[in-house]
Image: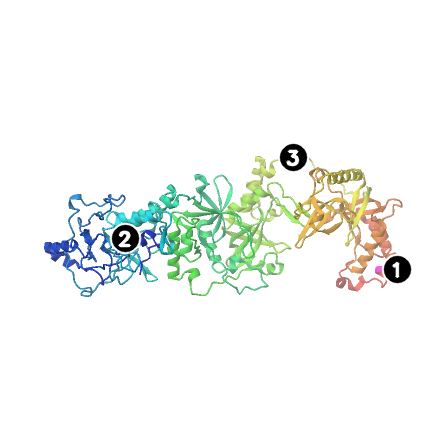
Amino acid sequence: MPGAAQGGTCGASRELDRSVPGAGRALSAGSGAVMSPQEGEEDGEEGAARCDRAQHTPGPGGSVGPRGLSGPPGPGTESGPGDRRCFSTCGRRTARPGRVPAPRSIPGDPPAEPPEGLRSRVSPARLPVPFPARTRVPARARPVRPARPGFPLHYALPVPVSRPVAGRGPARPARHGFSRPGPAAVPGQCPTFKREADSEVPEPFAAEAKFFTESRLLQRDVQIVLESCHNQNILGTILHPNGNITELLLKEGFARCVDWSIAVYTRGADKLRAAERFAKERKLRIWRDYVAPTANLDQKDKQFVAKVMQVLNADAIVVKLNSGDHKTIHLSSIRPPRLEGDSAQDKNRKLRPLYDIPYMFEAREFLRKKLIGKKVNVSVDYIRPASSATDTVPAFSERTCATVSIGGINIAEALVSKGLATVLRYRQDDDQRSAHYDELLAAEARAIKNGKGLHSKKEVPIHRVADISGDTQKAKQFLPFLQRAGRSEAVVEYVFSGSRLKLFLPKETCLITFLLAGIECPRGARNVPGLAQEGEPFSEEATLFTKELVLQREVEVEVESMDKAGNFIGWLHIEGVNLSVALVEQALSRVHFTAERSPYCKALLAAQDAAKQRKEKVWSHYEETPVEEVVPVLEEKERTANYKPVFVTEITDDLHFYVQDVETGAQLEKLMENMRAEVGAHPPVEGSFVPRRGDFCIAKFVDGEWYRARVEKVESGGKVHIFYIDYGNKETLPPSRLAPLPPAFSPRVLPPQATEYTFAFIQVPQDEEARADAVDSVVRDIQNTQCLLNVEHLGPGCPHVTLQFADSKSDVGLGLVKEGLVMVEPRKERQFQKVVTEYLNAQEAAKSARLNLWRYGDFRADDADEFGYSR
């Protein structure tokens, strides 16, 4: 049975096996003579003469040849007594020098040239000397000790005698009773001979590989190292006195390494990989069309030193380059922990991969503790191109896969050896893999053997982590414990902005949102309902500073209080540095007035004064104002009435309304006229606009005209919620009725003309029917009419105003109170007392007349709390 090649099947070895029995097979006790070391020493010169006569005795129909090699036999002949094989086995002794004969020419062939690479070191004068005679004994006369893996055996590779037999087709090598499979020659894969019908077709370089092996091993004394056994095939390595035929085949480009069996190679798989890499770099033979995975990268991009900023998951990290840029690096050839098959995950609970996937948290923690904030060596192995999404696989962007090492330790190998990741398997022709792929396979084998991590048979560790971010009730329960604990240990999981973070508390096993106390940091960009707010200056710089200093680091926190949204407020320390003070020192935040009662007030004020003197970042436009005598100003006790004409365009269900300024009405009409002319001259292509929340666009209204709008929300199924920025109304449209807003008509040219206001001094009814009556009355009276507007005071959402009819100058809000449609909102400011008194008198008159809200009397007397009303 033919033996399999170590690390794969070698075509040259298989051809050698067919033409040279014994070159790719282990000799068994059933053929030839077996000699023990003691017998070899006792034979002496007499044994040498017998062996010499046996080797040069002509067989029937054949000629004398070296070591039993016969010339062309006569037709119909079988193997005779002269076709003996002379070989030796040695269990513990090495081959004696001078006993390795050179190959002799086959009759009819040109003389063999000395092979390159593996030349014999025996002097030419000693080449004709035959092997010492061996005493031939029956095949089963002496037991043969089994060989251990990696234990060398000495063999002499003889030349086969092929004898054609009449009626049996072409000649085949004589088998001579080989009883078991033997070791293959090369732990790699060479081009093969494919059998088609009655002929064999060689693959490219298959014949050259066969000749390369024959010319170096034929009729040589060699060592065969038995490595392992796989599927009844013995795996082994053939060693010539001058070297390893495996490495030479790989180095010359005649073979490739095979992953499935290279792990059992005992003579160093790195040598085989190096020999294969040598052939790849020079594009020898089978590698003539080879292109390296990183051929398009510069040397500085292939290998570099970077600082680890963040661990994304068990196989991806974010590093900071020397240029200051951030780059995501994936560890080559490993797969992080993942959910296998149908998980028992609760369908009603959102999956949290870090805590719900077995061993994902342990793998992340291993990388975090080893790498965060440290410099590592990155060697890019390959770049995985971007892939599009399919039915089962999501889309992936381009990924840079590399070997990351620190202190000479391969992080991926360490991760695999602890059973926190597995090794990817590749096709044989896939070269996009780690440069240390064999070490990764060996580490995985050790982890499996020792039952570590993912390969353990123990119960999977469970992490029950409570997320109380934004949960006011749970936050109130945790607050007393955190206040009494003083400084608590935590890990920064995420940085939202310069002063807003998400922390993991190991002792409490919970996640909290944490706000830095005592400072006012620039707000970052965010999307709020109805508007996309841009970030304040230096907000991104503050966020980046906080990330570099504390992200995924172990810190200490002091919790002082919490806000109404369930966020904890306090101080954060890292390695003795107060993050609030550090932000103020870097001129990335200002001191908040609440810092006056904290123990860190002096440090904060000193840092702020130093930043002001430098006039950096948030203090770049700071001008020190001269100290002047403060003159007390009497509070204004009279209400200011400065009415301006407006045009009411929209009334909302909560009794808010949108108006346009009459003074800018002509500019709006001109802009709309020019915009429609532009759109008519260059009609938009349907489907060219991809709506995104916060984008400005133009929308086609039901009247067929185009208006300026802003995207509020995008739903699945082709529904887009928009807001007409010049009129205040909202609508849901398909994307086909939207188009990009031309830059010449953007809000920078003319700001949005619709401004939102609400009525001052009145309270909208909570009852839906009563509120609808009030809204209907306002719509009938003022929508699409010109009115007079006066801003009374500012509110949390929009300014509060009083509105008058343009012709009669009567107060619209006061009219609603007189009709009993709304209630009065009392104000305590002195300047509003006259107006509020007038409103209250009108409310009493409506109550006496039992109008609308008051038709059943004063319902607020006993049921104010129940119905949500307050006097």
Q: Which amino acid type is marked by label 3?
A: Thr
- 778 and 575: which is toward the camera: 778
- Which amino acid lies under the numbered mark 1 shown in the image of this protein? Ser
Q: Secondary structure at mark 1?
A: helix
| First in sequence: mark 2 vs mark 1 | 2
**Is residue 853 visible to us here?**
yes
Q: Which mark is residue 625?
A: 3
Q: Residues within 10 Å of mark 2 (few under 14, many from 20)?
A: many
- Position of 478 with respect to 47 (left or right) is right
Which amino acid, by three-letter code, is at mark 2? Ile
Q: Nearer the viewer, residue 315 or 806?
A: 315
Q: What numbered label is drawn on residue 192?
A: none
727 versus 345 height, above or below: above
Label 1 CA crowd tier, 10 Å (few <14, some 14–19, many 20+): few
Asked whether, in this view, residue 72 is left or right of residue 702, the answer is left
Is disc 2 in contact with disc 1, using a CB cutoff of under 8 Å?
no
Which residue, given by chain and number where applicable, does mark 2 sit on?
238
Asked where in the image residue 616 lies, by quadrant, the reply is top right
- Image coordinates of residue 373 in percent, x first then y, are 47, 47
Marks 3 and 1, Cα distance to the nearest angstrom? 58 Å
x and y, in percent, of residue 369 in the image: 45, 52
Residue 343 belongs to the span the image colors magenta: no
Horizontal side of 697 relative to 607 (left or right) equals right
- Camera-nearest label, 2 or 1: 2
Name the residue that disc number 1 marks.
Answer: 848
Q: Is residue 602 visible?
A: no
The magenta segment: 848-853
Q: CA distance from mark 2 to mark 3?
A: 90 Å
